[in-house]
Amino acid sequence: MSNIADLEPKILEALGAIEHPSYKQSLKDLGMYDRAELEDETVRLFLKSPDSERKIQIDLESQIRGALRCVELPGKLKIRFEVDESLKPEDIGNRIRGVKNIIAVGSGKGGVGKSTVSANLALSLAAQGHRVGLIDADIYGPSLGKMFGVSGKQPLTGDGENRVHPHEVHGSKLVSFAFLLNPDQAVVWRGPILGKGIEQFLYQVLWGELDYLLIDLPPGTGDVQLSLGQMVDLDGAVIVTTPQNVAIMDASRAVHMFTEIKVPILGVIENMAEFICPSCGHVSHIFSKNGASAFAAKFKVPELGSIPLQQSIMEAGEDGLPIVAREKDGPIAQAYTRVIDQLGVEIESIAKTKSPRREPASRRGCPASPFFPAPQYGHFRARIFAREPLPRRPRES
């Protein structure tokens, strides 16, 4: 490679694969490339820097040199940073650029239908014209892929810069750990590795502009929940429970956990609240009744609504088309519409009283997990999705 014109595409490709640790964007997207010059068998690379933080510049220079190591340069490489504060993007704290509301859906307990509720909440919001994304963060038992008709390991496409496109299904965007695993494959992760997987679902998926990003959490109050609270500013959490005391006890622990990490509780949804006999119309409270009402009163949180227990909900999930999409005008869809109407009220109320966002947490030095490529932080390189940048999505004709 003998001239700068041939070299520039390779430089831009390298900059596109490196993320700025402060601004969570690639160096290419930030517009840091200025020019490259060839002088006396020396390639001089001039980069614009949003700030004068020398430590960050040193780390970035090391990553750039590593990325260009396989490129046949016509001479010795010298890198120079020139401060240009106009490149500095708006400080969004621990947010995902372009996403307005980030909501966790938790239960503190398995078996209460949390994932089914998450799926139908997402599609109810999409039916009202909102742009919706959904993360299946239940690492040990991901099921949203099945509910959306996208079962098993799925091919992933990206932008060529270690970021992936979510699957777009039934009007919403979806990523799930199920897309990365063979159907019977178990996940045996703990602690920081779990956190890295969640982090990359948040920041290395091309979500675009979203009104709502829902995160379907695993049961309990463990590593994933705590990591999530540190990595991203959640606008609130929705608690899903069934009416009986055993579920309420665990939901109480979820409330305490979210309170500890300073995530506001948007409300509680009572799932499987009642069973209406399809033959005679008799109402049976199989799992007791009024549990969510007592829970809401005890913790002074809103009661967002209740969802009945029906066979059609199960059948819709098994068929890969959640009930609110299959029976758009049915009673279940109407129940979810009431829930999201109340949810909107609570989000707006909390937004008016919300304190300033926390300072961005450092995301350097996290252990790697084995699936897709992560950005490089300093001398550390983590990979989760794949070993090489994912193929670009084909352009639509």
Image (cartoon, grey):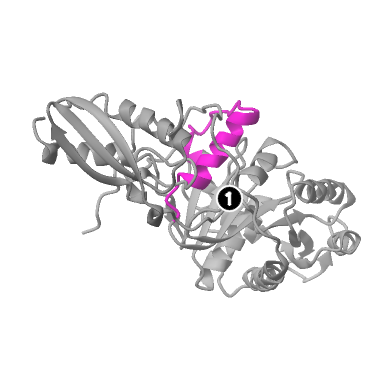
Please name whichever residue, 218 or 33, is drawn nearer the observer in this view of the structure: 33
How far across and down, in percent of the image, does residue 215 sit? 60, 51
For the residue marked with disc 1, what is the amino acid? Asn
Q: Which residue is mark 1?
A: 94
| Residue at position x 60%, y 37% in the image | 139
Query: Which of the 4 image quarters holds residue 314?
Result: bottom right
Image coordinates of residue 358 in percent, x first then y, are 65, 51
Q: Quadrant of the N terminus?
A: top left
User: What residue is rendered at 68% in x and 42% in y?
Assistant: 225
Which residue is painted at 70% across and 40% down in the image? 226
Residue situated in front as seen by the camera: 311 or 374: 374
Q: Quadrant of the C terminus?
A: bottom left
Q: What residue sits 60% from the left and 36% below the top?
A: 195
Numbered-mark total: 1
In the picture, measured across the screen, residue 264 lies left or right of residue 152, that is right
Residues drawn in magenta: 178-207
Residue 265: x %, y % from top left: 75, 58
Q: Position of residue 71 (x, y in %)?
A: 21, 27
Q: Mark 1 falls on what kind of element?
A: loop
Q: Is residue 138 magenta?
A: no
- In the rendered image of this protein, does residue 311 appear above or below residue 162? below
Tag 1: Cα neighbours inside 10 Å, few (<14), some, or many (≥20)? many
- Up the image or down, 285 lies above or below 115; here it is below
User: Is residue 185 located in the magenta-colored stretch of the structure?
Assistant: yes
Q: Is residue 213 above or below residue 390?
A: below
333 vs 50, left or right, is: right
Residue 326 appears in the rendering: no
